[in-house]
Amino acid sequence: MVDLKLYKGKKHVRVTAVTLFNVVKAIIAAGKEAEFLKDAEKQKFNLQASPEDVNFVKTYLHSNKLHENNAAMLHIVAPQLDAAAPTCFGV
């Protein structure tokens, strides 16, 4: 068994796309998506990204047409900004 070692620092930590992708894959493989999202919402979990990183994701989704049959991805690529969704991702 592996002991949990929590981060005790005070500064924000940079998370690479590879790390984030591997975490998401592990959550999905375990069938824990709904539970994670519910717990993350309670925790008010969020990640911050630079404008360049945001536009990389938007461009990648658009260039690979990942928004064409997925409403959530379309909302990221071309958000309808309003008071209810005032972010660059539109979510």
Image (spheres, rainbow, N blue to C red):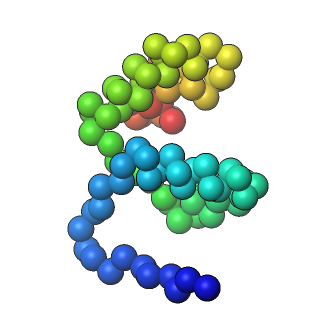
Residue found at x 34% / y 26%: 55
Residue 48: x %, y % from top left: 35, 48
Q: Is residue 72 left or right of residue 76?
A: right
Q: Is residue 14 left or right of residue 28?
A: left
Is 60 or 42 nearer to us in this picture? 60
Can you see residue 25? yes
Residue found at x 62% / y 63%: 39
Is 63 or 43 nearer to us in this picture? 63
Q: Is residue 52 above or below residue 13?
A: above
For the image, the number of numbered tags is: 0
Q: Is residue 44 above or below residue 78?
A: below
Q: Is residue 5 above or below residue 28?
A: below
Is 90 or 68 nearer to us in this picture? 68
Q: Is residue 61 left or right of residue 87?
A: right
Residue found at x 35% / y 27%: 56
Which residue is outermost to the front?
Answer: 1
- Would you identify the image quadrant in which residue 14 lies? bottom left
Residue 58: x %, y % from top left: 42, 24
Which quarter of the image is occupied by the N terminus? bottom right
Can you see residue 79? no
Residue 2: x %, y % from top left: 55, 83
